Image (cartoon, rainbow, N blue to C red):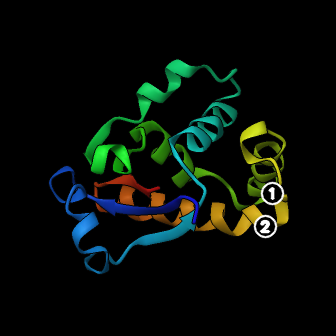
Amino acid sequence: MGILADLYVATEDEAARYDGSPDGFPHRLESKRITGLELSTLWALMRDVEWSAGMMDDFPLVMERDEGEVYVLRLPDAMTATLARIPPDQLSVAAAKWVATEEMAGSSAEDIRPFLEALVGLARKATETERSIYLWNSV
């Protein structure tokens, strides 16, 4: 089946409730295969730094159940702010760099660009509403 991945805008109090009622979150992006690892790789590329395992600490665990098969992470606020300001012409550059990583092997920049566009939209909504972006994963 693979990994299900939803990104959504919420407050800290709302974030853990996503698993029970995702339809109650109007600003969300449904995806597959994206975990904190892939997002931390993107975050490293956005900052032009080399990725390290310690960067996973920037994505704190908000909720976990079923022995880790379902969990929610919060994206770093700085990542959300940076995504909200990224110019549209830079999305192709970001997509090309991201798909060149081992974590995104098998993806193309053309395929990942719509995901990045939607993620930027979530970041803008999160910034406007003073909320954060959360990642829900189910294995």
> Tags 2 and 1 in contact by the CB under 8 Å rule?
yes
Amino acid type of the residue tagged 1 in the rendering: Ser
Q: Residue furthest left?
A: 13
Q: Which numbered dot is residue 107?
A: 1
Q: Position of residue 130 (x, y in %)?
A: 28, 54
- The answer to whether residue 96 is above or below residue 117 is above
- The quadrant in which residue 136 appears is bottom left
Q: Which quarter of the figure is the N terminus placed in?
A: bottom right
Q: How many marks?
A: 2
Picture layout, residue 35 above or below residue 58: below
- x%, y% of residue 94? 75, 48
Q: What label sits on residue 59 in the rendered view?
A: none
Q: Is residue 15 above or below residue 64?
A: below
Q: Nearer the viewer, residue 53 or 49?
A: 53
Residues packed near mark 2 inside 10 Å, few (<14), some (14 to 19) or many (20 plus): few
Between disc 2 and disc 1, the foreground one is: 1
In which image quadrant can residue 6 be found?
A: bottom left
Whether residue 139 sits left or right of residue 111 in the image: it is: left
Q: Residue at x 30, y 81 (%)?
A: 23
Q: Could you tell whether 86 is left or right of 66 in the image?
A: right
Q: SS for tag 1?
A: loop
Mark 2: amino acid: Asp
The residue indicated by pointer 2 is 111
Question: Residue 82: horizontal and vertical position, in percent?
Answer: 54, 44
* Location of residue 133 in the rendering, given as x and y in whole percent from the top left corner: 39, 54
